Image: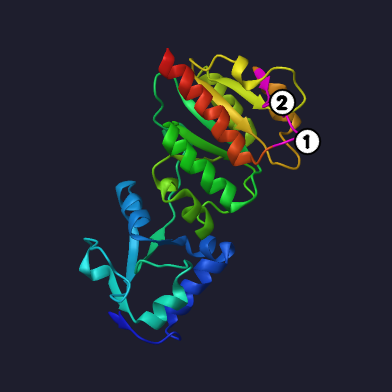
């Protein structure tokens, strides 16, 4: 394997572009990209297997200890080609997919879980993962995913927390059964209810279920909910961005648990 690449037409470089731009290609190869010193470190701490680490001395400001056999140096011109950041820091890794099963999640005594149904925008998903990490959520479960969790924009928006919070892809039926078996209260968000999110007790195990901004939650989730909650709008608009709504409700749960 080449240890120093100066050509943008190198097959390894062409493949990086494919992995960056096509979710279908990421899935086919079982590989994805992680750019950034902090994100790569979080991935390593989270047990993600790195296949290769591409680096450029012209951008590097801090060292990253790594297996030399997997290091590939590239020129500044090549790194500018493979980077998807405006201000790169000189590190880009190729990593293997990892799959976390629902039954393998390690839950706290009173679990706090976020469940997302059909969330579409990578930036929203990444922001929710960052919020989940900040709040100390046990896991994020995604039903009917509309975006690839290893989309570069998800990783960037999450600032690497996609690797620090267990993220599980699962069906609605299995997720509902999981919550019921673990005695986790299901809190479904919908504008069609009178109960505000601040009127709910979050001190036991609970799952906050968020739907897509345009359609909201499916009937299946609404029918399975222990309680339906909403954030009351005080202005002209009738809804908030899903990542903002998730943060508001999640930190109300954290506030109540801290006070408890």
Rendered location of residue 252, percent (x, y): 53, 24
Residue 81 visible within the image = yes
Q: Are marks 1 and 2 in contact (CB under 8 Å)?
A: no
**Residue on which disc 1 sits:** 236
- Magenta run includes residue 230: yes
Rendered location of residue 201, percent (x, y): 55, 14
Q: Residue at x 27, y 66 (%)?
A: 61
**Crowdedness near tag 2: few (<14), some (14–19) or many (≥20) residues, C-alpha within 10 Å:** some
> Callout 1: helix, strand or loop?
loop
How is the model colour-coded? rainbow
- Above or below residue 179? Residue 34 is below
- What span is in magenta? 227-239
**Residue on which disc 2 sits:** 222
- Magenta run includes residue 233: yes
**Crowdedness near tag 1: few (<14), some (14–19) or many (≥20) residues, C-alpha within 10 Å:** few
Q: Residue at x 50, y 73 (%)?
A: 17
- Above or below residue 131? Residue 93 is below
Q: Quadrant of the N terminus?
A: bottom left
């Amino acid at each position: 394997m080449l240890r120093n690449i100066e050509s943008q037409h190198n097959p390894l470089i062409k493949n990086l572009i494919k992995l960056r731009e096509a979710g279908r290609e990421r899935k086919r190869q079982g590989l994805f990209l992680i750019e950034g010193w902090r994100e790569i470190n979080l991935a390593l701490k989270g047990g993600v297997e790195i296949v290769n680490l591409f680096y450029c001395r012209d951008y590097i400001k801090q060292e990253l200890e790594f297996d030399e056999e997997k290091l590939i140096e590239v020129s500044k011109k090549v790194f500018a080609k493979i980077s998807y950041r405006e201000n790169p820091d000189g590190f880009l890794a190729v990593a293997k997919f990892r799959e976390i099963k629902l039954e393998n999640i390690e839950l706290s005594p009173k679990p706090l879980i976020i469940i997302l149904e059909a969330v579409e925008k990578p930036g929203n998903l990444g922001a929710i993962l960052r919020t989940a990490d900040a709040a100390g959520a046990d896991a994020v479960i995604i039903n009917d995913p509309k975006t690839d969790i290893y989309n570069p924009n998800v990783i960037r928006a999450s600032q690497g927390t996609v690797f620090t919070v267990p993220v599980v892809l699962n069906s609605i039926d299995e997720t509902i059964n999981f919550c019921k078996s673990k005695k986790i209260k299901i809190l479904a968000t919908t504008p069609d209810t009178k109960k505000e999110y601040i009127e709910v007790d979050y001190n036991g195990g609970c799952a906050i279920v968020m739907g897509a901004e345009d359609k909201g939650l499916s009937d299946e989730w609404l029918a399975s909910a222990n309680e339906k909650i909403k954030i009351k709008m005080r202005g002209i608009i009738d809804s908030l961005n899903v990542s903002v709504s998730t943060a508001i409700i999640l930190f109300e749960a954290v506030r109540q648990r801290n006070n408890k």
